[in-house]
Image: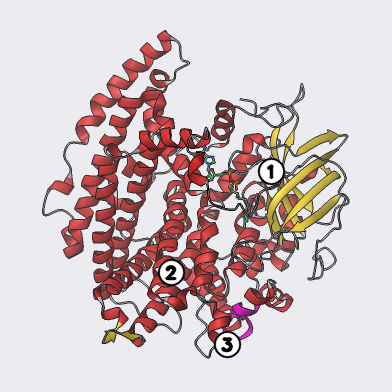
Amino acid sequence: MSQETGDRTGQVSEREARAVAEAARETEWRKPSFAKELYLGRFRLDLVHPHPTSDPDDVAAGEAFLAPLRAFCETECDGSVIEREDRIPEEMIKGLADLGAFGIKIPRAYGGLGLNHVYYNRALEIIGSVHPSLGALLSAHQSIGVPEPLKLFGSEEQKREFLPRCARGAISAFLLTEPDVGSDPARLRMSAVPDGDDYVLDGVKLWTTNGVVAELLVVMARVPATESSRGGITAFVVEGDAPGVTVERRNAFMGLRGLENGVTRFHQVRVPSSAVIGGVGLGLKIALTTLNTGRLSIPAICTASAKYSLKVAREWSRERVQWGRPVGRHAAVAHKISFIAATTYALEAVLDLSAHMADEGRNDIRIEAALAKLWSSEMSWLVADELVQIRGGRGYETADSLRARGERGVPAEQVLRDLRINRIFEGSTEIMHLLIAREAVDTHLSVAGDIIDPEAKLPAKARAAVQATAFYGRWLPQLVTGPGQRPSSYAEFGRLAAHLRYVERASRRLARSTFYGMARWQGGLEHRQGFLARVVDIGAELFAISAAVVRAELIRQGGLLPAAGSPAPDGDSAYELADAFARQSRLRVDRLFDALWRNTDSVDVRVAEGVLEDRYVWLEAGIVDPAPEGAWIADATPGPGTGENVARRFLPSTRESAG
Ligand SMILES: Cc1cc2nc3c(=O)[nH]c(=O)nc-3n(C[C@H](O)[C@H](O)[C@H](O)COP(=O)(O)OP(=O)(O)OC[C@H]3O[C@@H](n4cnc5c(N)ncnc54)[C@H](O)[C@@H]3O)c2cc1C
């Protein structure tokens, strides 16, 4: 279907918005998917166990990069400087560029390091733990910026022209969001009008991570439909200093100080048609496909943050004595420490399993990567919140203030602030729930689609009913029993076997529950966001338990190399952590199952309607609004810019050094 939607003001209906998202979806499943099977009630342990491992050559190349990277980060990079000055010092960026950190995943043939996902993530963990803005800089450049879309969809000429520049340090940015375009790309207004062999770009982009300093941009713009082309949202690669590009502002945030994030205006920016990536109308598909594995960089940064939280919790809770014992020996704090340790272990398990699966290429990992992003951003936030609580008043105090009083400058409040954005960008938690739910119920939609489509005609519904009866007649009986009910199943996992049996049983129960939801609400299911979110969250926890258990077994068998300079992981302690995590996770799963049918969803929707209709406005009396005036959404009318261009470029342009 055409992606041409909406009127000229960008107004689009819910149906149009959904149609645009649907058109960008990858619909084919050529490889098996562990998570998709899980949602269908089939626990395919064989897809994740034995835990995949990296090729020895990849390990050697990865370790050869990590050693100097770690040394550089330990000796040359001080995160507190970034925090204080709200800028990443130029020499840090230059040092990272010299090490090749801007081309970690770029193939060697194009001047990059050609490392795999596992080592890209490990590098992000090291860099992100110095300061998360460094992680954001590199991941916005490599996970969504110019290199990845070109690697996946670019022509050979584009790859030869741009990838070596990116690898040398041409910082890149990805520009989709506009003041009136957030989670819903169907509203996208920025235009790309064909003019001879060129396109002319006009519009305003918001929250452009790296945009202030970027040399290269991936820009999403709408090509109008013509008689010969369906047009649609299209990705362009654009020079950051092209005439007509103005960075109008550098934005400031709750966290991620040092992020070079801006507002970029395009006024009559002329680009050649060779700047189109992939093809006209493929922009959103490119964005979504890029994110399939690109999404793993957020879990990497979340995992690094949780590891740091664990380190501080361990050291501080032993040292700080109150009421006659170290605070870590008071049960209330011990519960938090256990949660932090077990969750950190599982965060790494989810990240590493997903990345290894991405490298191995045997499975389709788009749901696993999406689950990893969703689950890691939520859980690491809880971990950081517990760390702040364990640190007491010091958790709320800034690192600079602590240092000034003569104490260790632990930035616990900064950890919390920096993590918060991960639940919003690269797909907010709410949007991730919808995106994953769409995949989880995909099989149902394809067999029962016309039955539940309110607009389908009667004959189509009748045909769909016959098809659905045949499918469910075969499928539902399979959900009644399974290996999870046999006490001897998965015995090779020792005491962790019980958790795998639980996952197997819960997977079938989840599929049955999804079916009941479909049967009960039919076409209305898509509006039952509370129900769908719980279905997705149960799947996320089951994936995390599976990852935790297979990782423990990998460690027990000596299959996990220790990180340089760190103690070797041992099987017994990995089993302990996996066991603790699975027990904690199972309680969350049980609560989620219960809440599928016992909740306040309908009441909440009614109350929210009341709020939006001003029914309870009396409740807000007695306060002062600190932000009384101003537009909710800034005007983004295309046209010439009026302000100063605040773009900064500090590295020598890679164009000049090319060839
Ligand atoms: C620091 C930072 C860096 C960023 N970097 C980039 C970047 O490099 N490139 C880029 O293009 N963008 C970037 N963004 C934009 C980011 O991706 C968006 O903020 C995000 O997509 C959410 O859009 P929004 O903020 O407009 O929220 P909105 O879409 O306005 O949503 C508001 C709320 O409603 C919820 N919501 C929206 N639709 C639905 C729905 N259908 N069902 C249920 N809930 C819904 C959302 O989850 C959210 O809670 C960045 C943003 C920030 C703050």
Which one is nearer the viewer's eye here, 194 or 647? 647
Residue at numbered disc 3: 404
Residue 313 position (above or below residue 659): below
Residue 611 position (above or below residue 48): above
Residue at position x 36%, y 80% from top? 314
Whether residue 76 appears in magenta in the rendering, the answer is yes
Q: Is mark 2 within 8 Å of ligand 1?
A: no
Please tell me which of labels 1 and 3 falls first in the chain: 3
Name the kind of residue labelled 2 in the image. Answer: Ala
Name the kind of residue labelled 3 in the image. Answer: Ala
The CA span between labels 2 and 1 is 35 Å
> Is the C-beta separation of discs 2 and 1 under 8 Å?
no
Dominant secondary structure (helix, strand or loop) of the stretch shown in magenta:
helix
Residue at numbered disc 1: 633
Q: Quadrant of the N terminus?
A: top right
The CA span between labels 1 and 3 is 40 Å
Residue at position x 66%, y 67% from top? 102
Residue at numbered disc 2: 306
Percent coordinates x, y for residue 263 in the rendering = 74, 53
In this rendering, would 342 be left or right of 64?
Answer: left
Which one is nearer the viewer's eye here, 408 or 259? 408
Q: Quadrant of residue 48?
A: bottom left
Q: Secondary structure at mark 1?
A: loop
Q: Residues within 10 Å of mark 2 (few under 14, many from 20)?
A: many
Which residues lie in the magenta part? Answer: 73-81
